[in-house]
Image (cartoon, rainbow, N blue to C red):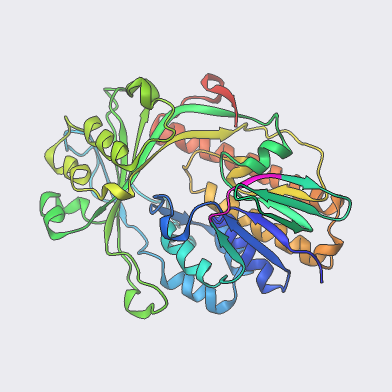
């Protein structure tokens, strides 16, 4: 029997790859550094559009794809565009998804997605496994973990996010960009008390708060999340309705201790969101004052270089998703690109005749297509970020080693 594919990271891309390999009877092992009972706060919503939908249809069995559909939230209606003082610059319906959006997208709660599809991988997913480094041998690759254990495989796939340890070893000179934007995302339960404090036009749809006259003010996107098929899902409990929100500000507006956005606790992130919006209208402040602080997190908005220069492929190691092409979370491109990578890699393993037949040529072609698609996705995400959230031009961003 062939040695398994070793997947580092149980985010959406890693899970999608594992499901696609399982569907095609390709052996694999999936490793996640967090304990299952202690996932970091990442319960914010994602938009799965056509590339992601196609990838999931390819990766999942029909039964699992149906489960995916049933665990999705309602497609959002158009929302409003407001100023921090609560005055609306547009009528309800003037801001929101573009035409044709509803027929080509799903709204996904990230934590629900992970819980649903990790449960189906029982026995092949291992938690509390913090990857440290890999060693390539003539006939295998060995992954070493912080707990002192090792695993041998035919191919190691880094799906371990923006700060990927796999990428740091595979492509140690890989440069990226610090956009200077910091994002705080969170969830506020849609209780009757919250809804009573909000204008009715805030209750549904996806809305944006910006102040074009004051660049020091953060901008906020918020969206009501409801699960219409809750009664039909028996395998897991879907979240209660909540208000998803993401607050964008510049690091220059933050205390120096928080500028980098690393290792900021959930409570610190929640407190900061309240501080940054303290002068806003009471109805908007309620979204932050009534948040579930345990679900709040702050991140630095980092990106791969838009041109994504080529590299020499390996026959034993490759990457997918944010581990190689992090991008601004606008235009719904990041998660969809990761899903596309995962399905594409699995397809190439199958077409090669199984993991034992995968060589440098197979990986090289996969990585060429990955770069070509990622360049387009990064460009679209950047344009969306500049238009909606004041993202700086690429030329003004700080180059960093990711």
Q: Is residue 138 left or right of residue 32?
A: right
**Magenta-colored stretch includes residue 115:** no
Q: In this view of the protein, can residue 377 be seen by the observer?
A: yes
Q: Quadrant of residue 183?
A: top left
- Which residues are drawn in magenta? 128-133
Q: Nearer the viewer, residue 125 or 19?
A: 125
Q: In this view of the protein, can residue 103 be seen by the observer?
A: no
Q: Nearer the viewer, residue 160 or 139?
A: 139
Q: Quadrant of residue 46?
A: bottom left
Q: Is residue 347 left or right of residue 12?
A: right
Q: Nearer the viewer, residue 376 or 276?
A: 276
Q: Is residue 191 left or right of residue 248?
A: left
Q: Position of residue 53 (x, y in %)?
A: 55, 63
Q: Position of residue 125 (x, y in %)?
A: 58, 64
Residue visible at 73% across and 48% down in the picture = 318
Q: Position of residue 122 (x, y in %)?
A: 56, 71
Q: Is residue 376 left or right of residue 180?
A: right
Quadrant of the drawing holding the N terminus: bottom right
Looking at the image, the residue that sits furthest to the front is 148
* Count of number-bearing discs: 0
Quadrant of the drawing holding the C terminus: top right
Q: Position of residue 389 (x, y in %)?
A: 39, 34
- Decide: is 398 above or below 96: above
Q: Nearer the viewer, residue 98 or 237?
A: 237
Residue visible at 44% across and 27% down in the picture = 260
Residue visible at 41% across and 69% down in the picture = 71
């Amino acid at each position: 029997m062939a040695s398994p594919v070793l997947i580092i990271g149980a985010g959406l891309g890693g899970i999608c790859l594992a499901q696609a390999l399982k569907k095609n009877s390709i052996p694999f092992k999936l490793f996640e550094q967090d304990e299952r009972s202690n996932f970091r706060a990442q319960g914010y919503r994602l938009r799965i559009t056509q590339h992601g939908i196609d990838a999931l249809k390819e990766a999942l069995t029909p039964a699992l794809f149906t489960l995916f559909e049933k665990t999705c939230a309602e497609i959002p209606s158009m929302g409003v565009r407001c100023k921090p003082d609560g005055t609306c610059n547009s009528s309800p319906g003037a801001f929101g998804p573009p035409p044709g959006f509803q027929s080509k997208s799903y709204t996904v709660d990230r934590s629900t997605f992970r819980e649903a599809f990790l449960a189906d991988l029982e026995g092949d997913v291992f938690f509390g496994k913090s990857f440290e480094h890999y060693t390539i041998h003539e006939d295998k690759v060995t992954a070493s973990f912080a707990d002192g254990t090792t695993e041998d495989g035919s191919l190691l796939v880094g799906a371990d996010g923006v700060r990927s340890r796999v990428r740091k070893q595979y492509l140690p000179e890989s440069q990226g960009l610090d956009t200077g934007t910091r994002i705080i995302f969170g969830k506020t339960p849609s209780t009757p008390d919250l809804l009573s404090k909000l204008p009715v036009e805030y209750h549904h749809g996806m809305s944006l708060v910006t102040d074009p006259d004051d660049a020091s003010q953060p901008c906020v996107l918020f969206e009501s999340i409801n699960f219409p098929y809750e009664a039909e899902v028996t395998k897991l409990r879907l979240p209660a309705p909540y208000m998803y929100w993401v607050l964008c500000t510049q690091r220059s507006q933050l205390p120096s201790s928080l500028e980098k956005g690393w290792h900021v606790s959930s409570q610190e992130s929640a407190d900061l969101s309240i501080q940054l919006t303290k002068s806003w209208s009471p109805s908007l402040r309620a979204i932050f004052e009534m948040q579930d602080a345990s679900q709040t997190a702050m991140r630095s908005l980092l990106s791969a270089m838009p041109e994504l220069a080529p590299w020499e492929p390996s026959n034993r190691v490759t990457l997918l998703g944010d581990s190689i092409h992090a991008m601004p979370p606008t235009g719904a491109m990041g998660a969809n690109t990761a899903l596309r990578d995962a399905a594409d890699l699995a397809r190439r393993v199958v077409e090669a005749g199984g993991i034992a037949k995968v060589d440098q040529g197979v990986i090289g072609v996969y990585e060429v297509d990955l770069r070509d698609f990622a360049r387009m996705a990064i460009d679209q995400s950047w344009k969306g970020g500049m238009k909606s959230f004041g993202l700086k031009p690429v030329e003004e961003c700080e180059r960093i080693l990711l």
